[in-house]
Image (spheres, rainbow, N blue to C red):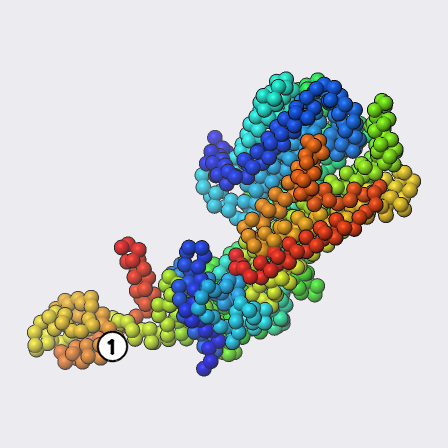
Amino acid sequence: MTALAGVPDLTKLITRRERIRLPIWCYAILASVGGTAYSFKTLYSTLESREQFADGIGRDPALAVLYGRPFDLTTIGGLTTWRMGVFGAVLLAIMSIVTVNRHTRAEEEAGRFELVGAGAVGRHAPLIAVLRVVLGTQLALGVIVGLVLIFLGQPAAGSFLLGLSIAAGGWFFAAVAAITVQLTDFARSAAGLAFTVLGAAYLVRALGDGSGANGPTWLTWLSPLGWAEQTQPYAGDRWWVLALLVLATAALLAVAFRIAARRDLGGGVFPARPGPAGGARLLRSVSALSWRMQRGGLFGWAVGVLIGGAVLGSIADSIGELLGSSARVQQLFERMGGQSGIENAYLAAAMNILGLIVACSAIQTTARLRAEETSGRLEPLLATSIGRVRWAASHLAYPLLGSALLLVLAGAGAGLAHGARSGDLGTQLAQLVGAGLIQVTAVWVVVGLTVAAFGLAPRATAYVGWTAVGICLLLQELGPVLKLSHWITDISPFAQVPRAPGVAVAAEPLLVMTAIGVALLVLGLAGFRRRDIG
Amino acid sequence: MRNIIEVDGLRKSFGRSVALDGLDLAVRSGEVHGFLGPNGAGKSTTLRVLLGLLRGDGGRATLLGGDPWRDAVALHRRLAYVPGDVTLWPSLSGGETIDLLGRLRGGLAPGRRDELLERFELDPKKKGRAYSKGNRQKVALIAAFASDAELLLLDEPTSGLDPLMEEVFRECVAEERDRGRSVLLSSHILAEVEALCDRVTIIRRGKTAETGTLAELRHLTRTSVEAELAAAPASGSLQATLGAFPGVTGLEVHDLHVRCEVDTDHLGTLISTLSACGIRALTSRPPTLEELFLRHYEDDLAEVSR
């Protein structure tokens, strides 16, 4: 069949190019799931301790909203599902979007696909090849996750269902990415579209899981991440929900191939429009140039975090309903400071998550520095009267100041939504904007680290940035439940940010983090001034 | 005449691979200087050091009287650069890119930009990625030629241009020279260098192999001579006489028809010997740049095959 010509060779090429990244992804996910299950097994070895946990931390409504609804917390498998089901599916979804994009649209944009496409290679071969690699890897990973859980003494059916639910979450978003890469000319916008779908899926699920018994719990069913959760491994094993995810993936892939068959190589469904014949008067500095390059992304993120903040904020008011009622819950309720204490704890956790999300956008914009350098576009700019630091500063405004703006917007979204529902708009708005803004000091630390890499070890720029955010995310997600020592969890700058609202904000950690961020930034820029370009 | 670029014993290594190994280069003010060498000889590395994008490991480089690393920004106001492989911003149109690069350098001559757009037949409204390689090259060339720079650094600027556009490019370089600007032109296209350049530097594996005017370089090499004689020399056979002649190689004799190459130093004595026999027809051709270049290149090949 000519449509499949070249697929085996392209599969080999992609496997070769991904021989480091995909194993890292797999290892990180396997280690998170396996490590979580193992830790639960040692920490909560008796049924009694698990029941205690289920009545305590397991009742924390913030966790249900942010990480997924618990179904049965009295087994190790059930605990692992609750903690890693949605989170694992999100990680695999990111892996899918990044990888599919890299080997399809990004290749076309770079012009490399022309070389490949001129060979005896079918039209759809690159897409088929990358899907083979991604879907195959994730299927294998799902099975291995299942085996690990069985090895840890969990029932086989639930173990495989959990592994495959996580994998199917990845599959669904591989199919989403297969569609978005057909739509636009640019790899960056294709990835942006796919991540928007992922963000929406997460928020819709959060709304569903966050609504009390009388609320719109059906919203969970509108989200593919909700489906990955609703397979309910170890608590009913609903295999038909998994089938639903697989069918939806197949349907989306069919759409992707239909669109791919109709478009030109290198083009999107939406054609490129001509631009102006001359530079407008505003386009006369590197700052204007970086604004042109970054404004689309900044605008997209702004809309995203505003909506994200509003959705997470709107849940706060009804969060207490998720607690249920028992004597222990009553105790917990009082310990957390009553209704407002629970709300504040939830909001602080939500702002922390938003801080981590904004950190992702900051790493993305910081990594632009290196991307511009390797693309060859930096060279002619530096051959004009633009100094290196001035050029770098024009881009760094986005991760440094843009991040602050995004966090203010996230806080404002949460404040408006929560304030409108609780009838205390002014106070909530001010409190939550502040709670959002202080997260920026932690963002500055990871940005500083990335810039230091850019100056001193430029090849590692993106790796250092994403690894830093990844570690912060894992520590944040797993630290408290795994009872990790504070020595370890405190490595993450996001653990240092005061848990506002509801606590007095100490200036000291904020100043220390700002100082660390600035020092790393200066180090990186000094290195950049001294090193070779290219 | 003062030198606008002076490079002495410049060295640059990337890890263990040596890119420049004691390179010398001198470009005089107001001249068009050809910079020749096989792929990977170190031409682009030299230009990047001159732009302060790379830092030399040893030796000295001076550009417009300043240090290219330390005074980069001040010097860049006075020069324009065209890279060999132009990448454009995908979201900016060609016209926007030209204006931006010009403004960042300190201004474009307004009429000149439009004139150049017309001469190079470039549509300025297309977005960066829609341009073909030749058209991307034109964007960078127009931005450079429309600027008021004293010095143009051109790194294989005509790669991808069609022959008509190459002609426009040559006209533009000639105009720049007439306006008193200096040009350092790194190129592979020998006809272009021969047509445009006052002086030439040939580099090979990071070192300067030859430098001088084309006439000087030719002087160092052989001229091919072809002659039809009236009679054989009195002293013996044509083959024996010319075979023993100093500086003659590649001798071919058919009756009274002679073809050979001679070191340019011995050209005069060869001609007088030939004329003693009575010359019926004579062609003597100076070496082309191609032959100069190939001679150095062949040395490389010989060493590689060894």
Residue at position x 66%, y 50% from top? Answer: A447
Q: Nearer the viewer, residue A123 or A386?
A: A386
Q: Is residue A7 above or below residue A455?
A: above
Residue at position x 68%, y 31% from top? Answer: A482
Q: Is residue B132 left or right of residue B266?
A: right
Q: Splitting the image into 4 quarters, where does residue B186 fall?
A: bottom left
Q: Nearer the viewer, residue A281 or A194?
A: A194
Q: Is residue A321 above or below residue A450?
A: above
Q: Nearer the viewer, residue B158 or A332?
A: A332
Residue A534, given in percent of the width and then of the height, sits at 52, 57
Q: Which residue is mark 1?
A: B265
Q: Splitting the image into 4 quarters, where does residue B99 fall?
A: bottom right
Q: Splitting the image into 4 quarters, where does residue A418 fall?
A: top right
Where is the N terminus of chain B found, in terms of image quarters?
bottom left
In this view, the residue farthest toward the bottom is B1
Where is the C terminus of chain B found, in terms of image quarters?
bottom left
Q: Is residue B51 left or right of residue B108?
A: left
The answer for which chain carries disc 1 is B
Q: Nearer the viewer, residue A254 or A348?
A: A348
> What type is the residue that disc 1 sits on?
Asp
Residue A334, given in percent of the width and then of the height, sits at 87, 31
Residue at position x 78%, y 46% from top? Answer: A436
Q: Is residue A362 above or below residue B292?
A: above
Residue A330, given in percent of the width and then of the height, sits at 86, 26
Q: Is residue B66 left or right of residue B127?
A: left
